[in-house]
């Protein structure tokens, strides 16, 4: 019996590997371990691109994948933000704003799934990219001179997070 790896399996693997990123953040405050943590989160973020591309290219898109992929994204970014906030390296208010939107939209998706899965919009995908890189800049041991760039990137991520959440609800309302 052979196990066939599918895009959904890649998403599940991403979820299962998140604790390795969390562990590496807490393991040591050294620059080496922070770079290792960043690398883990970066590779897991790349799997998000890979599984979606693979699913579309091989015509293997599924409702489960359309639902599970954003859940994996939220778990990935949420684990990093919560960990960094606990370590006093990331503002709690940003963690709360982003996770409130992410959890709210996930609950909303569950409530309206009978109307069909609403796929991620370009704004939602851009939001995910900015969140990933923005949080990644907080994981990396950057010199203080780059903090304004890091903070600007995160400000754009926050704006995209709120804007894409509103857009998601508006699109659902129009599709009814």
Image (spheres, helix red, strand yellow):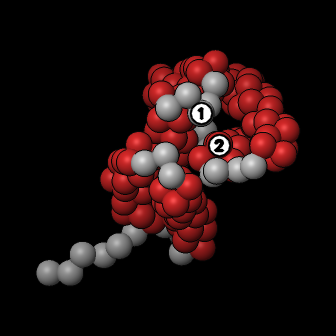
Question: Foreground residue, 128 or 38?
Answer: 38
Question: Foreground residue, 28 or 100?
Answer: 28
Residue 132 visible, this orientation: no
Q: Position of residue 149 (x, y in %)?
A: 84, 44
- Neighbours of disc 1 within 10 Å: few (<14), some (14-19), many (20+): few
- Neighbours of disc 2 within 10 Å: few (<14), some (14-19), many (20+): many
The span from disc 1 to disc 2 (Cα, nearest Å) is: 7 Å
Residue 146 visible, this orientation: yes
Residue ranking furthest to the bottom: 1
Q: Earlier in the sequence, mark 1 or mark 2?
A: 1
Residue for badge 1? 89
- Determine whether label 1 and label 2 are within 8 Å by CB: yes
Q: Position of residue 119 (x, y in %)?
A: 62, 44
> In percent of the image, x 71 and y 50: which residue is there?
142
- Image-quadrant location for residue 162: top right
Quarter holding the C terminus?
top right
Q: Position of residue 153 (x, y in %)?
A: 80, 41
Residue for badge 2? 138
> In percent of the image, x 53 and y 35: which residue is there?
84
Residue ranking furthest to the front: 30
> In percent of the image, x 50 and y 32: which residue is there?
87
Q: Is residue 176 above or below residue 54?
A: above
Indicate which disc residue 129 carries: none
* Dot 1: element: loop
* Dot 2: element: helix
Q: Is residue 53 above or below residue 141?
A: below
Question: Foreground residue, 65 or 161?
Answer: 161
> In percent of the image, x 75 and y 49: which residue is there?
143
Q: Position of residue 55 (x, y in %)?
A: 53, 66
Question: Foreground residue, 67 or 114?
Answer: 67
């Amino acid at each position: 019996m052979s196990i066939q790896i599918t895009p959904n399996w890649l998403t599940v693997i991403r979820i299962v590997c998140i604790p390795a990123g969390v562990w590496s953040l807490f393991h040591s405050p050294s620059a080496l371990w922070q770079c290792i943590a960043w690398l883990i989160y970066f590779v897991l973020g790349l799997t998000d691109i890979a599984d979606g591309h693979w699913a579309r290219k091989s015509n293997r898109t599924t409702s489960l994948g359309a639902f599970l992929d954003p859940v994996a994204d939220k778990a990935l970014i949420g684990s990093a933000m919560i960990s960094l906030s606990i370590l006093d390296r990331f503002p709690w208010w940003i963690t709360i704003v982003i996770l409130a939107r992410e959890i709210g939209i996930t609950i909303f998706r569950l409530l309206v799934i009978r109307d069909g899965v609403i796929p991620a919009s370009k704004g939602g995908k851009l939001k995910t990219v900015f969140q990933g890189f923005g949080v990644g800049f907080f994981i990396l041991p950057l010199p203080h001179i780059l903090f304004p760039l890091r903070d600007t990137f995160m400000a754009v991520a926050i704006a995209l997070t709120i804007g894409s959440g509103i857009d998601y609800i508006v699109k659902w309302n129009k599709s009814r």
